[in-house]
């Protein structure tokens, strides 16, 4: 796989769930990436970044970004998930959607502190 870029979307496993979920590349610096996935909006959801059908072709119902599940991958680690968890690239996200996901990452109380440090240290 070529280097991943902001706006790319990919299918990865999440935990023990064998289904590959849609993940958005929200930040990239020197080959290191931060990705977030989405889920169907529920009453208890973090509403920091909401998505509607049409925001991305794979978003077919009201959804939210799950900032608490965000992942930071160093470039060397990407080969590992390619081998074990990777289900392929999907259609890229629009710049507008990525901007909303990025803003939400900085605002959500659920974003992992390591991800916030990465964003700040790299002026992203």
Image (cartoon, rainbow, N blue to C red):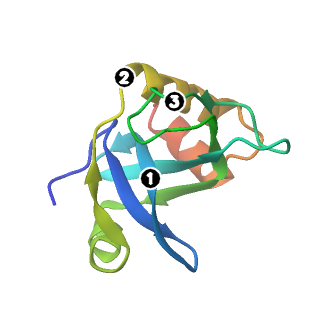
Q: Secondary structure at mark 3?
A: loop
Query: Observer-nearest residue: 75 or 16?
Result: 16
Viewer-proximal residue, 78 or 12? 12
The 10 Å Cα crowd at callout 2, few under 14, some 14 to 19, many 20 or more, is few
Residue 81 x/y as whole percent: 35, 72
Label for residue 53? Answer: 3
Horizontal placement of 73 versus 61: left or right? left
The residue under label 1 is 22
Do the CB atoms of the residues marked 3 and 2 lie less than 8 Å apart? no
Q: Nearer the viewer, mark 1 or mark 3?
A: 3
Number of the front mark, 3 or 2: 3
- The local secondary structure at tag 1 comes to strand
As drawn, the label of residue 103 is none
- Spatial CA distance of label 1 from label 3 is 14 Å
Q: How many numbered dots are placed on residues in this image?
A: 3
- View extreme (front): residue: 60
Query: Which badge, 1 or 3, comes first in the chain's sequence?
Result: 1
Q: Earlier in the sequence, mark 2 or mark 1?
A: 1
Q: CA distance from mark 2 to mark 1?
A: 17 Å
Give how far apart the Cα atoms at labels 3 and 2 are: 16 Å
């Amino acid at each position: 796989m070529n280097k991943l870029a902001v706006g790319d979307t990919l299918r990865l496993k999440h935990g023990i769930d064998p289904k590959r979920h849609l993940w958005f590349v929200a930040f990239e610096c020197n080959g290191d990436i931060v990705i977030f996935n989405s889920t169907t909006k529920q009453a208890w959801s973090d509403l920091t970044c909401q998505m509607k059908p049409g925001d991305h072709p794979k978003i077919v119902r009201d959804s939210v970004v799950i900032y608490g599940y965000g992942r930071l991958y160093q470039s060397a680690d990407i080969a590992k998930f390619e081998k074990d968890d990777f289900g392929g690239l999907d259609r890229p996200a629009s710049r507008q959607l990525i901007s909303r996901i990025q803003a939400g990452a900085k605002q959500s109380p659920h974003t992992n502190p390591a991800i916030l440090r990465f964003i700040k240290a790299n002026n992203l």
